[in-house]
Image: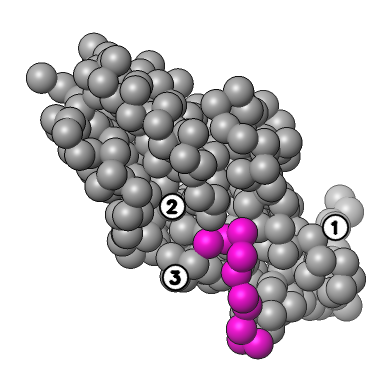
Amino acid sequence: MHTLTRSPSLLLTLLLLLASQNTAASNTPPLNVVVTIKPLHSLVASLMQGVRQPQLLLTTSQSAHHTNLRPSDYRKLASADIVFWAGATLESFIPTIEKKQQGHTQYISLIKTDGLILLAIRGKHEHDNHEDPHNNHTDPHFWLSSNNAIKIVSAITQTLIDADPNNAPLYLHNKKQTLARINSLTERLKKKLENTTAPFITYHDAYQYFEKEFHLNRITSITLSEDSTPSIKKIHSVKKLISQYKVNCIFFDAPTQPPIINTLLSDTRAQAIALDAIGVNLSAGPDLWFDLLDNLSKQMAECLQP
């Protein structure tokens, strides 16, 4: 009877191979991820829990349109493996940096995610054309739709797995947990905002993804862009709409109420309420996106519902 003998050298080779693979995996540096704005950072942070927290690029309330990056911000981008950003309509400075770097960093524009429901910037018929330099672009506030957030989470997960396959099981677990939270929040917001049909006005037209998803009744915005100033003609037009539709709520962008709001409120029963589309007053982290939408629903429901 012949017995199968194993060569000691072969066994040693196999053991060394396995050891080298384990060592390579353990010595792989953790993925270095940077995200430009708080809402998107929140979704990435939710997916990277237990691996490494992503870095947030824009930590202040400064407009992403006109950000002046610090040297430390440039270093942060240069050292990143992946940079998740919204798109050129919002962070117009990113394409220039990406071209200059030409390094190992992978830039992912999340507005290009497959399957997103994207909306055109509204109001060309409501505003003078010179008011807003971005009025030929897609509305960049796509994260305010929970349906879009689901697509974004799936796309981010795949990007992370492709770059860091060793942590794929954890990314997939976090994806499942994050999607469950999104679905639960969406159902809760639908109930909270059900039959909220009262007309309202926003200062900056930043909320249409949220409005359309929850069937809210915005009748106009005072400006197309947070950086533009309404014309006298527009101000008179808004005053007429407040009277015509008996508007009780004018929403402006936190943290600062524009002075023109007081002019619009005079001789009306309307009140001014701050909304936040980007998380100005919220702490960055995996809960921010959920708190952001929850706060939007609370502020709107409290003002609009009888």
Q: Nearer the viewer, mark 2 or mark 1?
A: 2
Q: Nearer the viewer, mark 3 or mark 1?
A: 3
State which tag comes first along the sequence, 3 or 2.
3
Percent x, y of residue 90: 63, 52
Percent x, y of residue 28: 69, 75
Of 155 and 216, nearer the camera is 216
Residue ranking furthest to the bottom? 71
Of 35 and 54, nearer the camera is 35
Q: Secondary structure at mark 1?
A: loop
Q: Residues within 10 Å of mark 3 (few under 14, many from 20)?
A: few
Residue under pointer 1: 4
Instruction: State the image quarter where residue 258 is shown.
Output: bottom left
Q: Is label 3 in contact with label 1 (beta carbons under 8 Å)?
A: no
Question: What numbered label is drawn on residue 278?
Answer: 2
> Which region of the structure is painted magenta?
63-72
Residue under pointer 3: 60
Percent x, y of residue 54: 53, 67
Q: Is residue 197 visible?
A: yes
Q: Amino acid at mark 3?
A: Thr
Q: CA distance from mark 3 to mark 1?
A: 69 Å
How many numbered circles does the render carry? 3
**Point 29% across, 39% down: residue:** 264
State which tag comes first along the sequence, 2 or 1.
1
**Point 33% across, 29% down: residue:** 239
**Residue 254 inside the magenta-drawn segment:** no
Percent x, y of residue 293: 34, 40
Q: Is residue 223 left or right of residue 294?
A: right
Q: Amino acid at mark 1?
A: Leu
Instruction: State the image quarter where residue 190 is shown.
Output: top left
Q: Is label 3 in contact with label 2 (beta carbons under 8 Å)?
A: no
Q: CA distance from mark 3 to mark 2?
A: 10 Å
